[in-house]
Every structure is written in C-alpha cells, then in structure tokens.
C-alpha cells in the first residue's frame, strides 16, 4: 500500500476473495460476482481433469459421472478433486457409491468442503497420513517435492514395496497421487526442483482432520491438552515472556517454526524424544542449533536463512539425522566430522560455502547431495568417490572447473546436474561407466570443450540438455549422440563446426528422437563448413522450435524444402514447427521451404547479409517476423496473419505497398491488417535518409504501434503519417 501513494490517480488494486463480506469491508468500488460453471462447462472440466481414459470406460460411466458433476455446484475445485479421485476407480459400483454418498447433497460453499471430505475418505490409508502432514506448513507455503518426500520418510510414512528399490521412488508415486486429486496443486519447477502448494480449502480440510493434534501456539504449561499436541506450526509468535515448560514439546512429532529463535532455546527440546522433524526459517543464534542437535531421534532438519557461518560440532553426534536441508544460509564450511547416517544433504544457495569436508566420504548411506548455487565452491573432495549409494549430485552454479575422476566410480548415480557451471572445462574420462545415469544437465556450461569419449554407452541417459562436439580425438564425436537422450525435449548441439562429414551428422540419428521438441544447432562461423552437414541432421517430426546459428553453408537444409532428391518431401512432416530462428548465415543467398510451413508462427532471420530471396509462399500462420537481411527481396509479400514486424539493417523494401509491386495480390495487402508492431529500423539502404523509409508506411492504415530505433531523430514527421489513422504508440529512439 505504501508504494501506491506515489502512483498515478488511475492506479487500481484488484482484490480476489471467496467472501463478499471481505470485498465490502475493503470498500471495493466495483464488485463482480463470478458465476459458477454451467453443467456443460463443468463436464468439460471434469473430462479434462480426468484425462484420456474417460471415453474408454464407456457410456455408463459417463452417465454416472455427469450425475456426480451435477452435485458439485459448478465449483472448479470440487470438480477437479472428484475427477482425480475417480481416475483410479475402475468399477462402476465405485462410481455409483460416490454418486449416492450423502456428502454430495450439500449446496453452496458447504458442497466444496463435502467434496473434499469425500475425496479424502476414498484416499488409501498411506496417502491420508502423508496428506495430513502437509498441514504442518502455513497457508500459501511453497512445498518442495523432494523435501516433502524426505519428510514423509522421516515419519515412517513410506514403506518399501516389491519391485521398487528406493523409498524416494515410492514417495514420488505418493506425490503424484496427491497431485492427481488436486490435494497438491500448482506444480512448477524452481531452480531445477519441483514445488507445489495447497489450496486454502484443502489446507483447512487437512487441519480439521488433525484437529487438536496440531497447535499453532506455544504451550504455556504441561496440561493434558498440551500433551495431545503432536504437530506445531508456529508463525508470527511473540517472544515468550517466560521460560517454556520443560514438557511442552514432549509429545511433539514435527515442528514448523518461522523467525522465532527463542521458542526452541532454553533446552525446550531436550526431552522431545518423539520429535522426528524440525523446519525453521531465519535463525541467528548457534544456541538454537545446539538445542536442536540435542534431539536424540531427529531424522529431518530443514533450515532456511541460517545467519551463522559455522555449525556447532554437536551435529557430529546426532546419529539419527537422515535428511538435512540448509538453504540460503551463510555457512562457510561444514564441521570436519558429520553424522555418518546422512541420506540427503542439501546446501543449495549457500553462496559463501567454499568446500565440503573429506569426511563426507564416510557417509556411506548418502543418496543425494545438492550444492546448487554455492557460488564459491571450486572443487569436490576426492572422498566423494566412496559414496557408493549416491544417486543425485547437483552442483550447478558453482565455480567448479573439473570434476574428480572418482565420479566415474559412483555406479548408482542417476542424476548429475551441472546446470550453468560456467567455469566447467571438461567432464571426466570414463563417464560412460555410469550405467545408471538417466539425467545429465549441462545447459549454460559455456566453457565446456566437449563430451568424453564413450558417453554413447550411457544407454539409460534420457535427458541431456547440451551436447558439445569437441575438437580432436580426445572428445566424443556427434555419432555418440545416437544412443542417448531418447526422452529429451530440449537439446542444444554446440561445436557443429567440428562435424566435417555429412555421414557423421547422419549417425547422430536426430530423426529418431521422437520426444524432441526444441532443438538448437550452433556453429562458430568460418568458411570450411560442408553444405551436406546440415542435411545429415534431419529433424524429428515433432519439433516445435528450431534455432540454427553460425552456419556458413551456401545451401539450406534439403529436408526443409518441398523436393528432396526429385520427390515430394511432404511439408506436413514439420506440421508442429511453430518457431524458427536462423542467425549468422553469411553465405546463404536463397532460403527454400520455410514459407510453406503450415504452423510456423514466429520467424527470425538475423544477420544474413547475403540472403536475396525466400522462395515459395505464402506463410499460412505467421504472426511475428524479425529480419536483418539487407539484400532480401520478398515475393510474395507478407500475410494478413502477421501482427508484429521487426526490421534491422535497412530492409525498407519490405515496407513497399503490394499495390506498387509486380505480382500484387489483395490477400497480402497491408491495408487490411488489424494489428502490426513495426520496429527496430536500423537505417536506410537507399541513402535517402529515414524520411524515405517512413514515407513507405503511409499505406498501413490500421497500424496501431510503430517503434523506431537507431535513427537520428527526424526534426519532423513526414506528411504521409497523416494517413496512419489508427496509430496509438510512436516511441522513437536515436
């Protein structure tokens, strides 16, 4: 509110609430009551939330399903929750039982709570306890998936099942099940990790189930009611005026504490023998840490924003601790001795952390190490090779230049995350020995010189964001890409200038990577590029985004043209391609096949000084076009679908009205365009100054926004601008 005092008189605050009373108290100027969904829209939402299996169940299921949806009162949350619950119910009797349940007979806001309770009732028992534990967090809290699974494991809520070797994999299924019924929602990725939250009404349900087992206040005495509290969520608590009772937390199982150090000092946790997890935010005193490390059976510790540079030595004696998450903290280093039963150690965003102790190798149960964004970390200890059970290693955004060769002995490693390790020069030889490696994140490793030979042996490697073709026999050739990255959706291939023969490019088998959606090919520009190399890298059919840069060949890829080898290629093969950016093509004179792409919406042609023509036409779906092609002559002219046009480097000939040009067709007329942003004009090739180019705009009578850059500001606008009746915005930058 304070920031709005200096804002304009037209500034507004938008308040969203489920209660009309709240809107009235806020003295809202305008109230808009959102209507409930119609029965038709409710069924559409149910169908979409249920997934593709609904139609396969048959007509009888759909009839019962529509009756259930009719009882949801048009409330989206209720519909999504019930759809997720019914997805695993394969018997028609189960559907009918839910339809006939009395809980669905409520109306209004009560119907939402009733639907949530009904869905909870149908949850398997193992999911019920996992769900209620989520109420430990305050409303709106961002819950990280991996930390939540570790929390469940600490409370013995996950048990191994036949055929699954790791508790974390079972926890992953539990998490997906709760997302399916919308008890956890808004799943998104943050710094490479999944996180989610709970809807407020779902949170209310979870807390109502725990009832008196969960407390949001500090116990003032050791009464019988206090003894019933097993879970504590302590936020916005005033500092205690007196010492806490010695038995106040004796029965505590889990604690969430935000920004109140004194709550767990004074030996308050010394007798908390049942306490399994502690989650804290903002700690400024090592005394608090010492108090925590006195908890003999603590299994899970999560601290965010620890304002201490060192941990007390007491951490070396807490043998029960399995998962430690210390994030956004000021730690410089860990104690020389650490608890050897660690399974998960997260120190992400500890930007002052410089090293790990050699004793980390003694943690023979260690499964996961997360050092993401530890900016001062320059190396890993060689002892890490003794962590034979290590499955996940995240060291992105660090200053590590080289990994220890002992990494190759980690036979159980499944994920190696080096994202944005900008000083990383090379990967260790023998990386191909990591037979279980499934994920290798290398994007934004700008100094990486190449991939180690033998990387193609990683048959299980499914996700690979970057492949660097190195120079010389020391590095793997592009052919080793054929057997890896089968499920990869994003792939950047850098160092293409080191691929000299077309048949080598063909061996990469890109066409067989059916899940690949976004592909980037990068050359360093020089004249020795073989024209056939690009032909060998034929695209897979479902690519939606293609970027190629630095290609010095004189001919574009044949697979993008209508005719290959004298027969029809079938441009529909690229029917998914929506975005294409071509940059730094110094020798290309003619571009074929691009104009016919049926779904292409955005096209960027940057720094293409020799390009003279784009053959074929028209662009059937083009919405955005950016060009830096001073010699280009476009025929046919641009389509009606175009909304944004950016021109660089004197391409004013594209502004000429089709009426003045040979081969004019009214279907390409600028004058009927509804919206067009024209900008980034960098000069006039004609030598007549900016006024000449501006005169060419006069036929664009529906132009709403014009942006001009890199022009010497004209003293006055040309008279032809008087015909631009729709122009609303005109920023000019000299």
Image (cartoon, rainbow, N blue to C red):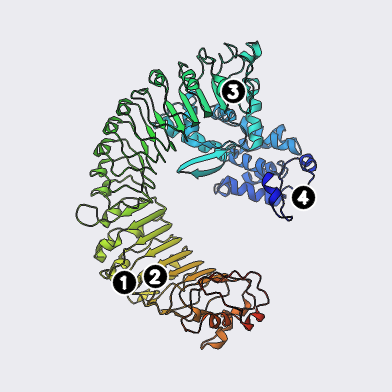
Question: From the viewer's perspective, is residue 268 above or below residue 525?
Answer: above
Q: Are marks 1 and 3 in contact (CB under 8 Å)?
A: no
Q: Position of residue 163 (x, y in %)?
A: 39, 32
Q: Position of residue 300 (x, y in %)?
A: 47, 25
Question: Which of the two discs, 3 and 4, labels the residue nearer the N terminus?
Answer: 4
Residue indicated by mark 1: 553
**Mark 2 or 1, closer to the camera:** 1
Q: Secondary structure at mark 4?
A: loop
Q: CA distance from mark 1 to mark 3?
A: 66 Å
Question: Which of the two discs, 2 and 1, labels the residue nearer the N terminus?
Answer: 1
Q: Which mark is residue 232?
A: 3
Question: Which of the two discs, 4 and 1, labels the residue nearer the N terminus?
Answer: 4
Question: Which of the two discs, 4 and 2, labels the residue nearer the N terminus?
Answer: 4
Q: Are marks 3 and 4 in contact (CB under 8 Å)?
A: no
Observer-nearest residue: 123 or 219? 219
Residue indicated by mark 2: 560
Classed neighbour count for the residue bearing mark 1: other residues with Cα under 10 Å, few (<14), some (14–19), many (≥20): many
Residue indicated by mark 4: 32
Q: CA distance from mark 3 to mark 4?
A: 38 Å
Q: Secondary structure at mark 3?
A: strand
């Amino acid at each position: 509110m304070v920031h709005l005092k200096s804002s304009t008189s037209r500034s507004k605050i938008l308040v969203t609430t489920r209660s009309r009373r709240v809107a009235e108290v806020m003295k809202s100027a305008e109230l808009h009551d959102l209507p409930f969904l119609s029965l038709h829209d409710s069924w559409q939402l149910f169908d979409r939330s249920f997934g593709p299996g609904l139609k396969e169940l048959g007509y009888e299921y759909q009839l019962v399903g529509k009756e259930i949806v009719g009882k949801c009162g048009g409330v989206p949350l209720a519909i999504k929750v019930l759809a997720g619950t019914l997805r695993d119910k394969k018997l028609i009797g189960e559907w009918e039982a839910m339809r006939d349940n009395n809980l669905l007979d409520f109306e209004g806001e009560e119907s939402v709570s009733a639907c949530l309770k009904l869905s909870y009732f149908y949850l398997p028992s193992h999911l019920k306890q996992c769900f209620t534990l989520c109420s430990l967090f305050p409303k709106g809290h961002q819950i990280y998936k991996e930390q939540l699974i570790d929390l469940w494991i600490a409370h013995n809520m996950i048990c191994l099942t036949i055929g699954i070797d790791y508790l974390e994999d079972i926890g992953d299924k539990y998490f997906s099940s709760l997302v399916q019924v919308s008890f956890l929602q808004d799943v998104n990725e943050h710094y490479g990790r999944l996180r989610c939250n709970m809807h407020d009404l779902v949170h209310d349900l979870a807390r109502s189930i725990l009832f008196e087992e969960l407390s949001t206040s500090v116990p003032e005495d050791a009464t019988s009611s206090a003894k019933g509290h097993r879970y504590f969520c302590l936020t916005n608590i005033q500092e205690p005026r007196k010492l806490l009772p010695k038995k106040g937390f004796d029965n505590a199982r889990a604690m969430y504490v935000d920004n109140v150090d004194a709550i767990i000092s004074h030996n308050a946790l010394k007798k908390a023998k049942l306490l399994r997890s502690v989650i804290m935010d903002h700690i400024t005193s090592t005394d608090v840490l010492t108090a925590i490390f006195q908890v003999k059976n603590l299994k899970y510790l999560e601290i965010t924003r620890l304002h201490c540079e060192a941990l007390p030595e007491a951490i070396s004696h807490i043998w029960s601790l399995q998962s430690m998450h210390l994030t956004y903290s000021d730690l410089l280093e860990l104690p020389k001795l650490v608890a050897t039963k660690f399974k998960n150690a997260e120190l992400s965003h500890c930007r002052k952390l410089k090293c790990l102790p050699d004793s980390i190798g003694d943690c023979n149960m260690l499964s996961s190490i997360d050092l993401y964004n530890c900016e001062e970390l320059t190396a890993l200890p060689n002892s890490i090779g003794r962590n034979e059970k290590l499955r996940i290693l995240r060291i992105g955004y660090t200053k590590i230049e080289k990994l220890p060769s002992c990494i190759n002995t980690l036979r159980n490693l499944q994920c190696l995350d080096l994202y944005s390790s900008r000083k990383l020069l090379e990967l260790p030889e023998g990386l191909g020995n990591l037979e279980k490696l499934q994920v290798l994140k290398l994007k934004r490793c700008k100094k990486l010189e190449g991939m180690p030979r033998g990387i193609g042996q990683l048959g299980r490697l499914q996700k690979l964001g970057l492949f660097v073709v190195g120079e010389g026999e020391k590095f793997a050739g592009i052919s080793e890409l054929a057997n890896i990255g089968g499920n990869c959706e994003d792939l950047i291939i850098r160092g293409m200038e080191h691929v000299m023969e077309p048949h080598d490019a063909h061996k990469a088998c890109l066409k067989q990577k059916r899940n690949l959606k976004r592909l980037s090919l990068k050359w360093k520009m020089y004249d020795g590029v073989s024209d056939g190399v690009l032909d060998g890298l034929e695209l897979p059919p479902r690519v939606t985004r293609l970027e190629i840069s630095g290609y010095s060949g004189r001919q574009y890829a044949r697979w993008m043209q209508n005719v290959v080898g004298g027969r029809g290629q079938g441009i529909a093969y690229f029917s998914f391609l929506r975005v294409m950016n071509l940059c730094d093509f110094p020798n290309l004179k003619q571009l074929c096949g691009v104009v016919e792409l049926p779904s292409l919406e955005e096209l960027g042609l940057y720094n293409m000084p020799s390009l003279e023509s784009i053959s074929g036409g028209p662009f059937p779906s083009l919405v955005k076009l950016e060009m830096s092609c001073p010699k280009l002559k476009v025929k046919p002219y641009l389509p009606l679908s175009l909304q944004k046009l950016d021109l660089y480097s004197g391409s004013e000939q594209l502004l000429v009205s089709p009426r003045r040009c040979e081969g004019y067709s009214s279907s390409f007329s600028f004058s009927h365009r509804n919206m067009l942003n024209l900008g980034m004009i960098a000069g006039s090739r004609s030598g007549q100054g900016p006024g000449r180019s501006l005169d060419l705009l006069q036929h664009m009578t529906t132009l709403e926004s014009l942006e001009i850059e890199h022009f010497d500001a004209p003293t006055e606008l040309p008279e032809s601008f008087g015909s631009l009746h729709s122009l609303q915005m005109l920023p000019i930058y000299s």
